[in-house]
Image: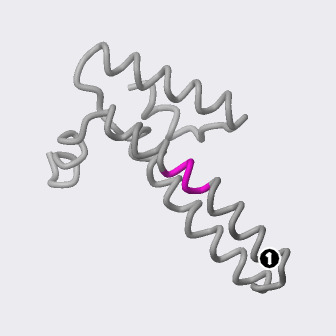
Amino acid sequence: MTEESRAETAVSLGDLIERHIAAQLATADAVRAWDERRAAGDVTSVVYLNGLLDVARDEEAGRMAIVNHRPRDDRESKLKLTYMAAYLFATRGTLNAAEMDSVLE
């Protein structure tokens, strides 16, 4: 087991989910703030897009931490599947093949 794998399993799925939800809320807040700044002419389109890209990366990192998390038991497995299903329904998103394999392990 690598150091990175051990670090990932040391964090509970519940903590990862809380972090991901916080990242999603921060993303929504940032989009609103950047939209207001852009509408006021305070920022250029490039600055606007770079600002949104930063918060999108944080949200993606949180989502990937959940996708790659190895459940400790059956309860965590069900929680992971339920959370990912709810996330995909809410965002109308999809998983690529590697992400789907990781979620189903």
Q: Is residue 40 above or below residue 17?
A: below
Q: Looking at the image, which is closer to me, 90 or 105?
A: 90
Tag 1: amino acid: Arg
Q: Is residue 83 above or below residue 50?
A: above
Circle 1 SS class:
helix
Q: Position of residue 68 (x, y in %)?
A: 38, 41
Q: Looking at the image, which is closer to me, 93 or 21?
A: 21
Which residue has dot 1 on it? 38
Q: Is residue 96 above or below residue 104?
A: below
Magenta stretch holds residue 25? yes
Judge left or right: residue 102 versus residue 60: left
Residue lying at 63% horizontally and 32% vertically, measured from the top left? 88
**Figure coloring:** one colour
Q: Which residues are magenta?
A: 23-27
Judge left or right: residue 101 versus residue 32: left
Q: Looking at the image, which is closer to me, 91 or 67?
A: 91
Residue lying at 57% horizontally and 24% vertically, measured from the top left? 85
Judge left or right: residue 93 versus residue 71: right
Q: Residues within 10 Å of mark 1 (few under 14, many from 20)?
A: some
Magenta stretch holds residue 82? no
Looking at the figure, which quarter contains the N terminus? top left
Residue lying at 45% horizontally and 54% vertically, measured from the top left? 61
Tell me where residue 12 sits by quadrant.
top left
